[in-house]
Amino acid sequence: MSVLDSETKRKLREMGVGSLVDALDVQDDTLTLGMVFEERVKLAVDDAHAAFTHSKVEGLIRRAGLRYPNADLRRLDLLEQRGLDRGLIAQLGTCQFITRQQNVVFQGFTGSGKSYLGSALAKQACQHRYRAHYVRMPDLEESWAAARDKPGGKEKWLRKYSSFTLLVIDEWLLDPPGDDNRSMLLELLERRYDAASTVFCTQYAKKDWHQRLGSGVHADAIMDRIVHNTIWIETGEVNMREHTATTA
């Protein structure tokens, strides 16, 4: 039980350290019996910091807009059957690719779990306290269209999407982008190049990207900012939606 008086608690909460007050309040006297003051404070600080970190991580996950908020890299089904490398998935889970500003591509058939993997990787980034964001390509283009008609909207939009430490773009190249969206993608990926990591979830193999990007100079430039520093992962042919439905 905390021996702090109510006025001291009030002042601590006013200073923004209410979690420390809570940690002191819930300390069990039978467990802290015999501890010196410094040890009790250290224990309370450790508990308060854990609560603070948990709250921060939960906030990052909530704001990331994940399609699958409960996705978890540690709970992937049928790894071997899908041709996924368990070691590579574990390596991605360390988020070292983010510190190296590497990109990741999840490529595979419809239902093969690309969106889940993208969500799980973004969630893992949040747990490492990185700012991550998930967006479908059609929604990205729609938000760009809305922003470009506002004064200063283009620059504000580009700053927003280039600032995420990890950006997951799902349904990448589902529909071939038009001229304006190709220009947007080039500018966005130029700003993120060697500065942040981007995850692409797509049905299309790398050999098809250039054509779907219009086969011109914009396609060349966009590809150049993706392919040289990217981890490519094929998600296989197993339909995970069908698998989940049959095992539920």
Image (cartoon, helix red, strand yellow):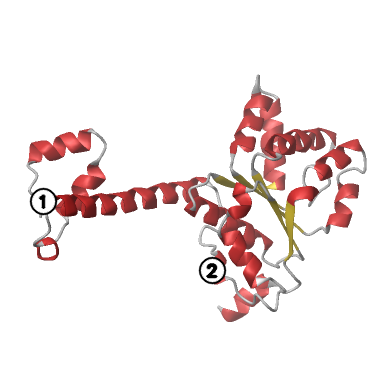
| Residue placed under numbered mark 2 in the picture | 74
The answer to whether residue 218 is seen in the rendering is: yes
- Compared with 204, 220 (above or below) is above
Q: Which of the pair 70/17 is nearer the observer? A: 17
Q: Nearer the viewer, residue 133 or 17?
A: 17
Residue 67 at least partly seen: no
Per the image, label 1 sits on a secondary structure element best described as: loop
Using residue 91 as the reference point, say whether residue 206 is left or right of it: right
Q: Determine the residue positioned at 23% across, 46% down.
A: 20
Q: Mark 1 points at which residue?
A: 2
Q: The disc labelled 1 sits on which kind of residue?
A: Ser
Q: How many labels does the image show?
A: 2
The residue at the point 57 percent across, 61 percent down is 93
Q: Do the residues labelled 2 and 1 touch (CB within 8 Å)?
A: no
Q: Please, what is the three-letter code of the amino acid marked with disc 2?
A: Arg
The answer to whether residue 21 is left or right of residue 219 is left
> Which mark sits nearer the N-terminus, 2 or 1?
1
Callout 2 crowding tier (Cα within 10 Å): few <14, some 14–19, many ≥20: few
Q: How far apart are marks 2 and 1 (CA)?
A: 39 Å
Q: Is residue 31 left or right of residue 113?
A: left
